[in-house]
Every structure is written in structure tokens, then in C-alpha cells.
Image (spheres, rainbow, N blue to C red):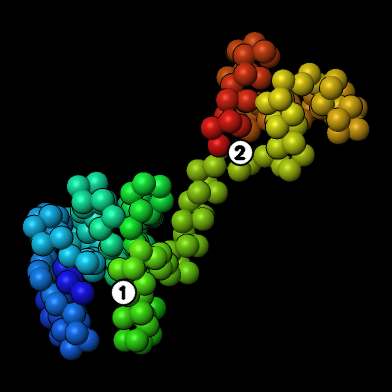
Amino acid sequence: MRVVIADDAVLLREGLIRLLTESGHEVVAAVGDGDALVEAVVTHRPDISVVDVRMPPSHTDEGLRAAVEIRRRVPRTPILVLSQYVEVSYADDLLATAGGAGGGGIGYLLKDRVAAIDEFLDALNRVAAGGTVLDPEVIGQLLVRRRRDDPLGTLTPREREVLALMAEGRSNTAIARALVVSDGAVEKHVRNIFTKLDLPPDATTHHRRVLAVLTHLRA
């Protein structure tokens, strides 16, 4: 395969070059910052890029931002992120490009968790073939973020049921009949839903109901 490497740590970069070359791959470019990575991929159109997350100038998330830009400019370009860190925001954006028409392989591995060379090379091949390879720690942090960002995450299962029936256009009385509970119980659930979704108390009950349903439909 033709590979682009992006890592500002010279020793690691040279080590990857040697490893990939000895494994029969061709390293067409090895760079140390995000802008150079984007330029290298656009120029060489490699079979896969191996990308670190934190590179100059700020050493925060340049590699991931460059990877997202690469997927925008050269769709379906396989990218394997190999880093010491999980940067959740741009990782989520990058993984989102793995689905739909964009497609293409995506991987995110933590350097400390790659226990063997064979494991790394296997991940490289799987991503280049269009697969998705994720470190368990990456998956865990993404799930935590999505739960935190879920506007319905604070609702109880019963409140979710009530909201789903509200979305069907049912009145409180109709919801009570469907769930075999009292009207008062439904009214309490509805008040809790309004509070947990932070819907403005100065709005009419009807408008709050509409806003709650819209939140349900967007989640």
C-alpha cells in the first residue's frame, strides 16, 4: 500500500516508516503538521494515512482536524488515527464520515494499547480495505459524550414513553388510558418532562408540549 504518515515526533515517525517499509508498504510522504498532511494526501492520494492527533502549532487536535478536512476534500480516503489521546469532538466528526455516501475506512487506536506489531498492521489493512477499527477506550468516551449530549438522556423510561405518545398527538387522558395510569400521573410525568428539557415556564402548556415533541423528534 501507499501510505502517508503524519506525526511530529521524529523518532516515532521514522519508526513507522521503517516498520511499514519492511512490511512491504511504500511511504509516499512523512510530515509533522496538519497542513502538510492535507497537502500530502491531496497530492499523493495514498491508500491510507496514519495520523497523530496532537501536532504543531498548538499540539491539541490538529491531526484530527486535518483528517476531517481530508475526508471533505478527498472523500473515502482511509485514515488510521494513532495517538496517545482521545479527542472526542473531532473524533466524532471524523467517524461520522465513515457512513453514508462518504464511506471509506476509519480507525482510531491509542498508541499505548497497540500491544503488537501484527495487531497494528492488521488494523492498517482493515482500515485500508474500508473497515472501521476503534480502540475500546475511544468507543467508551464517545458513548459518554453522546449520552451527555442527548437531550432526552435525563428522562426516565416512563417519561420517554409519555413523550413518545405525546409525539403521536395523544392527549393526557389518552396517554393515561394507553399506559393504564391515572390522569394525575400523566400530568406529573409531563411536568417532569418540561422541567428536564428546560422548556420555558412562561410559555403556554400547548407550546411547551410542541417544543417537547420537537426535541423528541430531533433526538
Q: Which mark is residue 157?
A: none
5 on left or right of 170: left
In the rendered structure, which disc, 2 or 1, sits on the residue that comes first in sequence? Answer: 1
Instruction: Select label 2 or label 1 by which is in front.
Output: 1
Residue at (62% x, 18% y) in the render: 210
Q: Is residue 210 above or below residue 134?
A: above
8 relative position to 119: left or right: left
Q: Do the residues labelled 2 and 1 touch (CB within 8 Å)?
A: no
Quadrant where the C terminus lies? Answer: top right
Q: Nearer the viewer, residue 28 or 32?
A: 28
Horizontal placement of 174 versus 105: left or right? right
Q: Which residue, given by chain and number where applicable, does mark 1 sit on?
A: 124
Residue at the spot 73% in from the left edge and 43% down from the top edge = 157
Does any portion of residue 86 appear in the rendered image? yes
Total labels: the figure holds 2
Q: What residue type is labelled 2?
A: Leu
Q: In which quarter of the image is residue 78?
A: bottom left
Question: Label 2 neighbourhood size at 10 Å, few (<14), some (14-19), many (20+)?
Answer: some
Task: Answer left or right for 147 relative to 195.
Answer: left
- In this view, the residue in front, 32 or 195, is 32
Residue 14: image location, x then y, percent: 13, 80
Q: Which element type, helix, strand or loop, lies under badge 1?
A: helix
Crowding at label 1, few (<14), some or many (≥20) Cα neighbours within 10 Å?
many
Q: Where is residue 105 in the image (x, y as percent from the top left)?
A: 34, 62
Residue 63: percent from the left, percent from the top? 22, 59
From the image, tell me which residue sits under label 2. 152
What amino acid type should be assigned to the residue bearing mark 1? Leu
Q: Which residue is drawn at 59% across and 21% down?
A: 211
Q: Kindly indicate the quadrant of the structure image that contains residue 161.
A: top right
Residue 46, position in %: x, y?
17, 65
The residue under the point 70% across, 32% down is 164
Separation of marks 2 and 1 at Cα, in angstroms: 37 Å
